[in-house]
Image (cartoon, rainbow, N blue to C red):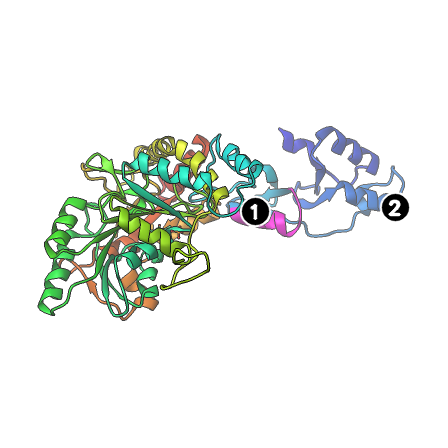
């Protein structure tokens, strides 16, 4: 085995050591004593320094100083090895057993690989559209890529109007603005979400009121929503809008939610930042509310590195959003403003990236769904793990593969996340619900009954690496790593 070619004793001459190093091609030697116990690592630099110190090639390695080299024990953590390699700028680390013997040498190339949660995945055409923008000097914001990206996205999700903006957060903010949400208004919002769903409510000086999830979809519970409306009616007010989040690529149960909201005549904003390409009862997620919002942030299913889109079948809403997103300029040659606006439009360069990405959206959905199926297939025998349910009305894009760890599991979700992190695999807890966030500690919160479903999902939920460009090898590494900590082969 290759290891034997690296082991040398102190009685070896410098010349012999150099010859061994030359034939092994490894760039290091491992010095061991008569009992084969590891002493230190020798680099070619160490040998060069002996010669420069005046030793000739026949001098032995006895002359090497005794130093303590970096090594790891058998149950090393991948992450620690990688950190050590970086800290000491070395490419190899010997593994030493309990008796002090070398049993392996770890090579940087096997450790220089993080498996991340969700990374960008470019297709073939993004560069073409960006190059075209450069060649035609359409570098300024707006331009033909923006118009085309809007039209192509509207076509892809089958909606009439779309407006490309600088982020998903900007899209939600504009949606609230055009629906007339203002100081002192109230807005219902799914609690189990990323903070960007709720922050824009506060930008408008309105108060968010959070709604719990249901078990079936992890999304807004129609029952909890109904309770919130009943309570509001009793107190003689109504929310100005309802923000429904489609979590991890899965649509909420829109028929039930729209039923309730229509009864109270309150408009729905669909936060579809995570669910582009997903479907509810065969129709595109994001097209059910009065307004839908998508995100093209770097971690989403397709990305423009940063961007968003606001969509609606109501032309006047999108026109108003367009006006506000370009600094609310009144139609005069001189700059005149009667309202406060924003600089929220997408640039022509980024829209070029978006056009390329949109071409591969369907493919990305299939890849992410395959990843979910892979995990399910390879991990379902671990009964402590449950997969995010996909109701029969849902066709999720499985942006992130989410699981929960049973309360009775010997391994808790945070331990699993820490274990994966040690193996250089990025996993994250499910979003921390908004009603548990310090910044929203004074906000109201409605559940369907006495238990808070989202609290449990947060406590036990984990998102596994789900990038559409993960290799089978990456996937299997995640699976093996999880099987290992649960002690199953
Ligand atoms: C990513 C995300 C947003 C915000 O989108 P940005 O483009 O990052 O501003 C909003 N809501 C949800 C649910 C998201 O996941």
Answer with mark 1 or mark 2, whichever residue precedes in sequence.
Answer: 2
Quadrant that contains the N terminus: top right
Residue 338 in percent (x, y) is at: 36, 64
Residue found 83% across the figure and 35% down from its top: 15
Nearer to me, 195 or 82: 195
Vertical relation: 160 (above or below) 70: above
Query: Is residue 433 in view from this perspective?
Result: no
Q: Which residues are magenta?
A: 79-91
Residue 364 in percent (x, y) is at: 38, 34
Residue tagged by mark 2? 52
Few, some or many residues within 10 Å of mark 2 (<14, 14–19, 20+): few
Nearer to me, 435 or 24: 435
Badge 2 element: helix
Residue found 79% across the figure and 47% down from its top: 64
Residue tagged by mark 1? 81
Residue 46 in percent (x, y) is at: 78, 45
């Amino acid at each position: 085995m290759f290891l034997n070619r690296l082991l040398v004793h102190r009685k070896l001459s410098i010349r012999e050591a150099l010859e061994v190093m030359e034939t092994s091609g490894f760039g290091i030697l491992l010095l061991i004593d008569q009992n084969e116990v590891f002493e230190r690592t020798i680099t070619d630099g160490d040998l060069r320094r002996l010669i420069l110190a005046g030793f000739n090639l026949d001098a032995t390695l006895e002359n090497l100083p005794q130093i303590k080299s970096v090594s790891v024990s058998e149950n090393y953590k991948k992450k620690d090895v990688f950190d050590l390699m970086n800290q000491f700028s070395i490419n190899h680390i010997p593994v030493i057993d309990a008796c002090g013997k070398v049993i392996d040498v770890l090579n940087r190339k096997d450790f220089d690989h993080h498996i991340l949660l969700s990374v960008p995945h470019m297709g073939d055409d993004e560069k073409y559209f960006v190059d075209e923008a450069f060649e035609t000097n359409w570098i300024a914001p707006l331009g033909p890529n923006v118009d085309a990206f809007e039209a192509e996205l509207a076509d892809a999700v089958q909606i009439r109007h779309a407006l490309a903006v600088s982020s998903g957060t900007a899209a939600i903010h504009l949606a609230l603005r055009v629906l007339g949400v203002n100081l002192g208004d109230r807005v219902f919002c799914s609690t189990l979400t990323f903070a960007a769903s709720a922050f824009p409510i506060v930008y408008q000086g309105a108060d968010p009121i959070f709604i719990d999830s249901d078990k079936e979809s992890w999304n807004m519970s129609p029952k909890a929503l109904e309770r919130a409306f009943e309570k509001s009616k009793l107190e003689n007010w109504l929310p100005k809008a309802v923000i429904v989040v489609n979590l991890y690529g899965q649509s909420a149960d829109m028929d039930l939610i729209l039923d309730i909201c229509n009864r109270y005549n309150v408009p729905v904003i669909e936060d579809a930042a995570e669910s582009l390409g997903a479907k509810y009862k065969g129709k595109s997620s994001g097209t059910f509310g009065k307004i839908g919002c998508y995100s093209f942030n770097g971690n989403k299913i397709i990305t423009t590195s940063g961007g968003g889109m606001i969509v609606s079948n109501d032309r006047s809403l999108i026109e108003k959003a367009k006006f506000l997103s370009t600094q609310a300029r009144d139609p005069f040659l001189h700059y005149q403003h009667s309202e406060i606006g924003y600089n929220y439009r997408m640039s022509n360069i980024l829209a070029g990236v978006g056009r390329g990405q949109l071409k591969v959206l369907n493919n990305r959905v299939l890849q992410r769904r395959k990843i979910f199926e892979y995990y399910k297939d390879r991990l379902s025998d671990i009964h402590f793990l449950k997969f995010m349910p996909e109701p029969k009305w849902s066709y999720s894009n499985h942006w992130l593969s989410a699981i929960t760890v049973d309360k009775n599991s010997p391994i808790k979700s945070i331990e699993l996340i820490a274990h994966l992190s040690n193996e250089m695999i990025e996993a994250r807890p499910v979003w921390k619900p908004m009603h548990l966030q310090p910044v929203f500690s004074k906000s109201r919160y409605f559940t369907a009954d006495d238990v808070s479903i989202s609290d449990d999902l947060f406590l036990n939920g984990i998102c596994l690496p789900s990038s559409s460009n993960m290799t089978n090898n990456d996937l299997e590494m995640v699976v093996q790593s999880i099987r290992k900590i649960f002690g199953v082969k």
